[in-house]
Image (spheres, grey):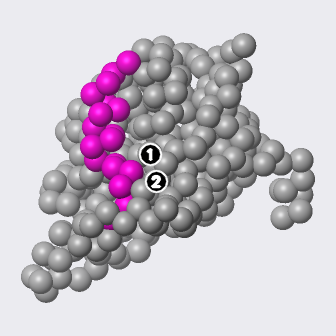
Amino acid sequence: MLEQLENQVAPEMMIKEYRGNWMENAHYGHISIVNEYGEVVYALGDPHYRAFTRSSAKPLQAIPGIRAGIHEHYGLSTKEVAVMTASHRSEEVHVQTLEHLSEKVEIGEHCLVCAPSLPLDEGSKEDWLRAGGGRRRLYHNCSGKHLGVLAYSKMMGYSLQGYDQPDHPAQQEIIETFATMTGMSTDDLIQGTDGCGFPVFALPLSNLAYGYVKLACPDLIQDEATRVAVETITSAMNTYPILVGGSDRVDSLLLKDQNIIAKGGFKGVYCFSLKKERLGIAFKILDGSEEEWGWVVQSILEQIGYDVSDTIHHLKENFSKKITNDVGTQVGYAEGVFHLKSSLS
């Protein structure tokens, strides 16, 4: 712990939340924005702060399977490719797509190591419980990723047992691909275990942002098979944004903009990239909150002069800075207080 804190650049305040006119919460963090060369062009706090990716890695984790051709081998639809990158809410469209994926690859949900769960979407959960339903592994928000890796393992003749373990050949290919995409060596990645059981990596935000530049601009990827796989994955995400997140999720809103690739992760990590501008953005809210994602993304886009006004408008509409109580009465407000520092001057 002491080693981790040494020489660390202090986080900066990003968001203040007020109840009445009294500040109730303050959220601190780090932001890193890099160009197509991996150079930091805008920052807040420490642009090289090392954070675990959590689910923001999912588009990158899907690359080995798609690169090997699982979508062609099993006849998968674009929807089924998109749900492999998802942190889904188990809405009806998610469940239908996951069940179709499971049927096509002939892998039952009992093979998944992720925990049996209830839908994260409140309406879907209420409907399911009223119908007498219980927890299902398919309802875990990472089940699409797990089915994708299992399908890849089955096609390659790898054991389905231990598919979540770091020494499994599928996971070895994932970590090698992830390192290449983010400009890291595998030895420099700090490895942990994610909530769903998969290996998860901690790396500098600047490198994570660089990986996202390559997702948005696959022409930067030297290996042709990897480049084609990234094009397939990101096209699916932009074609079916709802499958990547869900109703009223930041991921899904941003992915409706065909210029943006976006994916959040648990505990306050968020990543997105801009195709035309050739920029990758990664930020970490240190208290692990994700309620502020929409506000932070909105402010970043405004500060860098993003010219798709509809996207910013939709963010403001869907993620109002009004804080309301349980019956919808405004009781406070939030404000973004950070100012990106440019490295261009």
**Which amino acid type is marked by label 1?**
Trp
Q: Is residue 156 left or right of residue 344?
A: left
Q: State the image quarter where residue 287 is shown.
A: bottom right
Between discs 1 and 2, the one toward the N terminus: 1
Q: Report the front residue among 226 and 85.
A: 85
Query: Which one is in front in this view, the residue at disc 1 or the one at disc 2?
Result: 2
Q: CA distance from mark 1 to mark 2?
A: 9 Å
327, above or below 316, in the image = below
Q: Position of residue 293 (x, y in %)?
A: 46, 49
Q: Are marks 1 and 2 in contact (CB under 8 Å)?
A: yes
Q: Residue at x 20, y 60 (%)?
A: 91
| Label 1 crowd (10 A; few <14 / some 14-19 / many >=20) | many
- Specify the segment rendered in magenta: 307-324
Question: Residue 16, percent across and down?
Answer: 55, 54
According to the image, label 2 marks what residue?
Answer: 334
The verdict on residue 321 being magenta is yes
Q: Amino acid at mark 2?
A: Ala
The residue located at (69%, 47%) in the rendering is 12
| Residue position marked by numbered label 1 in the rendering | 295
